[in-house]
Image: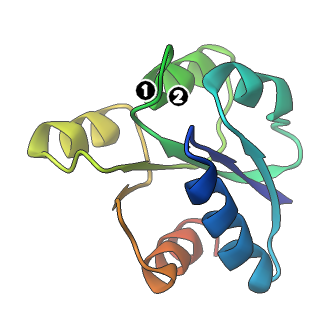
Amino acid sequence: MKIIIVDDESIVLESCRRILESEGYEVASADSVDKALMVIDPENTALLLIDIKMPFRDGIYLVNELKKQGCTIPVILMSGLNTPETIAESQKIGACQFLPKPFTPDELLKAVRQVIT
């Protein structure tokens, strides 16, 4: 099972990949919602780590689109916009966790372990 990271910032994708792979997780990534929709495989994906604010289509759109398709993969939403409204929206659409950016490797791993272990 793999974790898929969806973020438009390459530094976030690479940092998360490095941290998660060092702990033995299989990781794939996408730098846009459209690419994510092409790589997400509900049968072999344990977790989605999705940025909320991205150009064109955002993480909220992605989560809602996946729900329409009947996808039940757990989601951690992340964002640098850490307002009560953003956090409430992530809970409303069913995210398991909200991870405020910037986060430490320990914060990332703690959130992931809480969701998939």
- In the displayed structure, would residue 33 be above or below residue 95? above
Disc 1 to disc 2, how far (Cα)?
Answer: 5 Å
Determine the residue positioned at 57% across, 42% down.
7
- In the displayed structure, would residue 85 be above or below residue 99? above
- In the displayed structure, would residue 16 be above or below residue 91? below
- Crowd band around label 1 with a 10 angstrom C-alpha radius: few (<14), some (14–19), many (20+): many
Is residue 62 rendered to the left or right of residue 35? left
Q: Are marks 1 and 2 in contact (CB under 8 Å)?
A: yes
Determine the residue positioned at 55% across, 45% down.
9
Q: Amino acid at mark 1?
A: Ile
The image shows residue 42 at horizontal and vertical percentages of 81, 37
Determine the residue positioned at 55% across, 78% down.
109
> Nearest the camera: 70 or 82?
82
Is residue 49 rendered to the left or right of residue 26? left
> Nearest the camera: 46 or 3?
3
- The way the protein has been coloured in the rendering is rainbow
Is residue 95 rendered to the left or right of residue 3? left
- Where does the C terminus fall, quadrant-wise? bottom right
- Where does the N terminus fall, quadrant-wise? bottom right
Residue on which disc 2 sits: 63
Q: Quadrant of residue 90?
A: top left
Q: Amino acid at mark 2?
A: Val
The image shows residue 74 at horizontal and vertical percentages of 59, 49
The image shows residue 6 at horizontal and vertical percentages of 62, 42
Circle on res. 60:
1
